[in-house]
Amino acid sequence: MTDHTSRLPGFAQASREERIGILAERLGGNAEALQLFDNLGPIEGGLVDRLIENAIGVMPVPLGLATNMIVDGEEMLVPMATEESSVIAAVCNSAKRCRDTGGFFTSYSGSLTIAQVQLCGLSDPRNARAQILGRTDEIRALCDEVDPQLTSLGGGLREVDVRLVEARSGTMVIVHLVVDTLDAMGANAVNSMAERVAPVLAGWTGARPLLRILSNLADRRLTRARAVWPADQIGGPEVVEAMLLGAEFAEADPYRATTHNKGIMNGISAVVLATGNDTRAIESGAHAYAAHGGQYGPLTHWEKTAEGDLAGTIELPLSLGIVGGATRVHPVAQLSLKILGADSAEKLARITAAVGLAQNFGALRALATDGIQKGHMALHAQNVAIAAGAEGDEIEAVAAGLRAHSRVTEAEARKLLDDLRKD
């Protein structure tokens, strides 16, 4: 493909079949390899073309169910879309170990989304700030005009905040429109409001309006979850202490905290993806929130109760929706929401936070006991067997040999496969 230009006039207007034909030609006429793109699973071709530009097919991700979850007293199955073998197993195991204490308990701060309007070139930024804050009612009326349906449902502008941000070019006036977007993630609604308000603010203040866009640091949309794991369900007091020391490491060192939070997002992003929400928005907001105290730190905190059990909490921004975007049109996302019983963005966020806490417990316990690789590689053994060429019943036979030898490598898998086929 390096011998051809990437300039393809009319590619966006071509049919999906025509695009695949062009790609096949680029691959030296290897049309057979591109037959994979013919299978769109539960998504029909017209929908694929509407969801993205230049569509050629779909990239399926395994979808599984986390079991054993109790969230706010409700038993539930949680759909998770992920390619990592140990993620769902960790949530299932972690949730089972805290069932005797009631599972996970959550809280939700509300569905407030922030849009930012950047105003530049002002010599009197403090005067402009006071002027804008004095005209909140007029700003609210402008926002209501943009999305009257949202307002009729009880949402809409809740607050106007004005920040003075020092930058290299001088003081910028940054106006925050704080909008209740109810059961929507709300990006389109708040972006439209920012676009509507920006020229009006400029007319009032004499500023030059520039960026008009939502912020994915949704710190007005926080979700919290907590749970207690009895010491005898973990492995005893020594494991409790070891897990606390592991958590303390993450609090003290951003290098550890980054991987600590990546593990949390393994679970959270899997639920977000399964329900058709924006994984990138959730991940960027979570990591930004992890640094809101001035140093990057963990999204979870762990303590020992008076009884010697392990108590964990999580707090992070979760700007999720059950209406709009891919969530509304993707059939698998709709089915995932039905499995969850998530009839509101709030319930979806509460469940998602609980999964993140469960995921972190599983990772901390593994690290504090056998190490992360033992369990991970045992689950990963089938993938390695497939990569080595195993098929059908050979896959589990080779995977079992890898686990027995505690050497989960492709070279070892090929050796086991050769021996199996000789026999």
Image (cartoon, rainbow, N blue to C red):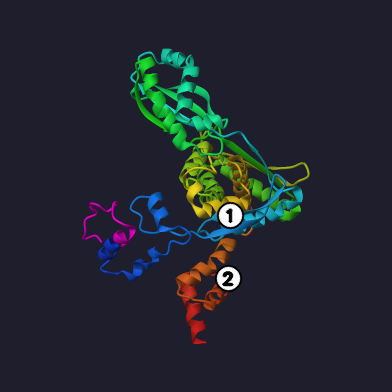
Looking at the image, tell me whether mark 1 or mark 2 is earlier in sequence order: 1
The three-letter amino acid code for the residue at tag 1 is: Pro
The image shows residue 222 at horizontal and vertical percentages of 58, 36
The image shows residue 316 at horizontal and vertical percentages of 57, 39
Q: Is residue 165 magenta?
A: no
Q: Nearer the viewer, residue 101 or 30?
A: 30
Q: Which residue is mark 1?
A: 79
Q: Main secondary structure of the magenta part?
A: loop
Q: Residues within 10 Å of mark 1 (few under 14, many from 20)?
A: many
Q: Residues within 10 Å of mark 2 (few under 14, many from 20)?
A: some
Q: Secondary structure at mark 2?
A: helix
Which numbered dot is residue 142?
none
In magenta, the rendered stretch is 1-20
Q: Secondary structure at mark 1?
A: strand
Pick out the residue farthest to the right. 307
Q: Is residue 12 magenta?
A: yes
Q: Which residue is mark 2?
A: 403
The three-letter amino acid code for the residue at tag 2 is: Arg
- With respect to residue 400, does 331 lie above or below? above
Q: Quadrant of the N terminus?
A: bottom left
- Give the residue displayed 69% in from the left and 53% down from the top: 239
